[in-house]
Every structure is written in structure tokens, then in C-alpha cells.
Amino acid sequence: MMIMRSNSAHPSAKRATQSRKEVTHDRIVEVAARAIRRSGYAGTGVADIMREAGLTHGGFYAHFASRDRLLAEAADRAGAEAVRLSADIAAAAAPGRSLQELLRAYLSKAHLEGVENGCPVAALGSEMHRQAPEVRHAATRHIKEMIDVVARQLPGWGMPGAHEQAMFIVSSMIGTMVMARAVDDPKLSKALREATLKHFSEVGK
Amino acid sequence: MMIMRSNSAHPSAKRATQSRKEVTHDRIVEVAARAIRRSGYAGTGVADIMREAGLTHGGFYAHFASRDRLLAEAADRAGAEAVRLSADIAAAAAPGRSLQELLRAYLSKAHLEGVENGCPVAALGSEMHRQAPEVRHAATRHIKEMIDVVARQLPGWGMPGAHEQAMFIVSSMIGTMVMARAVDDPKLSKALREATLKHFSEVGK
DNA sequence: AATCGCATATGATGATGATCATGCGAAGCA
DNA sequence: TGCTTCGCATGATCATCATCATATGCGATT
């Protein structure tokens, strides 16, 4: 079960259900997880997030010790969501097609245009090395998870080299999406995604 | 007494007759080109740049119509430098080894640690889609040039598919560097770079 | 229905940011 | 040598930002 973390000596109806504060906290994190992908770490202000969550800026520090703490929670959530989504896509694919489906989804136009709900590494990768240790740590953890997810879709899963190959695939996926979003030429953007898709078209189970 | 700054600092004798203002303008752009890679577009302020260039913030608008205009010039310069450096490395390599040397240099520890003088796409990629049109345009141009540089090192240069392959290679290079910089685990960082290096170890002329 | 505690709002503070108006001092011309 | 022009500095303005102190009002408990 859960540890009782009561903020008062009196039993103020603690139960498995979330308290009001927890619900709000959660909503702020969810909004922030989208905001950072849309506007970047540096471009996301406390007031923006609170406003988007339907609150005002003042209450923020009742929920988070600092802006960085929120960013860490938001990055963590975004990463966890991305890994879970990838695993789901792979799990739902026909046997032997999981890596292909994963790549197709990742390099899709929908993902290209849906930054705020997409891969946080593609959305925030080049800002990462400037972030607070907690943020980088969460990111690193999810990156490792993502590599594992990909590795499990490889024919030689468990064999030496599979992990290495998975690292390469993930690097390529992310680089392709970063580039495809960076350029202002839609044709080039599409060509970049298709080139990567084509390169991996034979890899799979 | 007064700090004499003449054009002797940088013997950039492109035009023998560079006015004082042009020299200063150039210096600001050069500083900015490093600053944006180090601190990101959003993290680079006008005052920071001017201070680093040995000036005060006030004179800025005598040189640039806006902050965005400077960022565009800085991005353009960083991109041009990166492409030129890559082409130089390839040109200096032993015959048939140019792509290998290029990859080795790009994925080196030196580049990993030298953000401010390195590839601007790896340093700024995920911030790019939010930038002013001029900035994105300059970036796109240099990305195309970079793809061409890589394509020319391929065995099947000119044959159908070479350009496609070059796009894939560039995407992978950039993605690998973004990831290697993002993670806070040096072992993983190194493993990512080596995985990509290994994957391309047979490609070349 | 009255009360009370907690979650959130209001508002303040000090820092920093982009932009601009204006003054000063040095470089070059007469 | 004195004058003019131009490049840069000083300093101000207005906006935004993170953070915090304090007020308020809702909802649950009595």
C-alpha cells in the first residue's frame, strides 16, 4: 500500500484516492510536460504553466520547491509516457513487425507536428545538458529504457551487439526527428524521415 | 590608456578596407555564434553577448535591427563554419577514408565537450523550430550543404540513393551527438558514440 | 449553520531582459 | 589644430520572471 503522508495530525480523510492538492499537482505537471516540449525548458515560465493549468502563479510554491523541481517532474513524466507509448506500439504490432511499426510511428508526420505530445528527447535534447542534475537524471533513465524497448524488438535480442544496435537505432530516430523539425523545407523534412525509414526497412524480427 | 582595439586581433583581411564598425559587428557575431551554442537561443541575452565582446549593451542596436537579426547572423556563421570544417576534414583524409575521418571527428570526445565550437544543429536542433524564419532558413541551407559534403564521400556518389544515404548518415550523426550530450552517464555517452561509429565502420569509399 | 484549515489568489519584490534616447570622446577631414 | 562625424557608453523604460508573504474563500467537519 501507500505510506501515510498526512499533513496534519488530524485524520483528514486519507485514502487511496488523491487529495485535492495531489490532483492539482498532477495537473500542473501534466501541463508542464507539454509546455516544455512546446516551448523548451528556457521558454517555459512558471506563470505560463499555472495559467494553462487554470491557476494563478502564486500558488506554485505550495506545490513545488522550485521551478527546477517542476521541470524535473515534468521531464520524468514526459519520458515515461514516451517509453510506455513506444512499448505499446511495439506490443500491438504483428509478430516480426514491431520495430517497423515503432519506426513508422516515430517518424510519422503526426509525430513531427505533435511536438508537445511527442518524444521529449527530440523536443528538448539539445537543451538537456544545461539542465539541473535531477532533470538530466530522469532523462537518462528513460533513454536507457527506450534503448531496451528497441533492443527487445530486434531479432538477436540478448545476443551480443543487440544493445549496441538498439543504441544506434535510437540515436538515428532522434536525430532524424530533430532534423526534420529543424528545417523549414517540408520536402527535405519528409525526405529525411523517409531516408531513415528506408535504411531500417529490413531490420526487424 | 584606453583600450585600443584595432583589427589586429583578427587579421580577417577579407576586405582590406573593413571599417571599424564592420570589425566590431563581426566580432559580435562571432561571440554570438559561440554563445548560442553554449547557452541556447533562449538562454542568450543581448547584454551577455555584448559584454563578452567587450562592449556594453547600449550600442547593440547600432549594429543589429533586433536580437533576432543577430541570432540569424550568428546561426549562419556557425553553420558555415561547421560545414567548412567538415569539408576540410574530409579533404585532408587519406583516399577512401574521408567518411571515416569525418565520423570519427564528429563523434569524438573533443566535439562532445566542445559544444560552443561544434555543430550548431547538435547544439541547437531542438530549439530550431521556434526560431525566426531567417534563422531557420540559414540553418536549412547549411544542413543541405552538410548532406552534400557527406554524399560526396560516399562510394556511390552521384548514383541514385547516395543522397538518401547521406541524409541518413547526417541524421544519425546529429542524433548520436544530441543523445551523448543529453545523458549524464559518461559510459552511456561513450557507448552511444561508439555504436554509431561501429555501424558505419564499413561505409566509405 | 457555524467554524476552521487548507488550497489557491492577490500583490509585492528584486532581478533581468529587450529596446531606445541621448551624450561623449576619438578618428579623420579641413 | 580645430571641427565634424560616427561609434560606443550611460542610463532609462517597460515588460517579464522567479520567488515569497499574506489574504481569502471553499469544503469538509462539527
Image (cartoon, coloured by chain):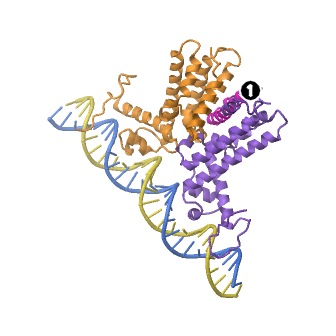
Chain colours: A purple, B orange, C yellow, D blue
Q: Report the residue at 53% width, 15% height from top.
A: B93
Q: Report the residue at 65% width, 66% height from top.
A: A5
Magenta stretch? A169-197
Dividing the picture into quarters, in which one does residue B58 lie? top left
**Front-most of B167 and A25?**
A25
Image vertical order of residue B82 relative to residue C11, above or below: above
Q: Extreme front residue here? A: A159
Chief SS of the magenta region? helix
- How many residues crowd mark 1 within 10 Å: few (<14), some (14–19), many (20+)? some
**x and y, in percent, of residue B181 in the image:** 56, 37
Is A195 left or right of C24, judged from the image as shown? right
Image vertical order of residue B105 relative to residue B52, above or below: above
**Front-most of A81 and A30?**
A81
Q: Chain of mark 1?
A: A
Q: Extreme top residue here? A: B95
Dividing the picture into quarters, in which one does residue B122 lie? top right
| Quadrant of image for the N terminus of chain B | top left
Q: Amino acid at mark 1?
A: Lys
Indicate whether residue A195 is drawn in magenta: yes
Is B165 left or right of B121, judged from the image as shown? right
Q: Report the residue at 69% width, 32% height from top.
A: A169
Residue linked to disc 1: A198
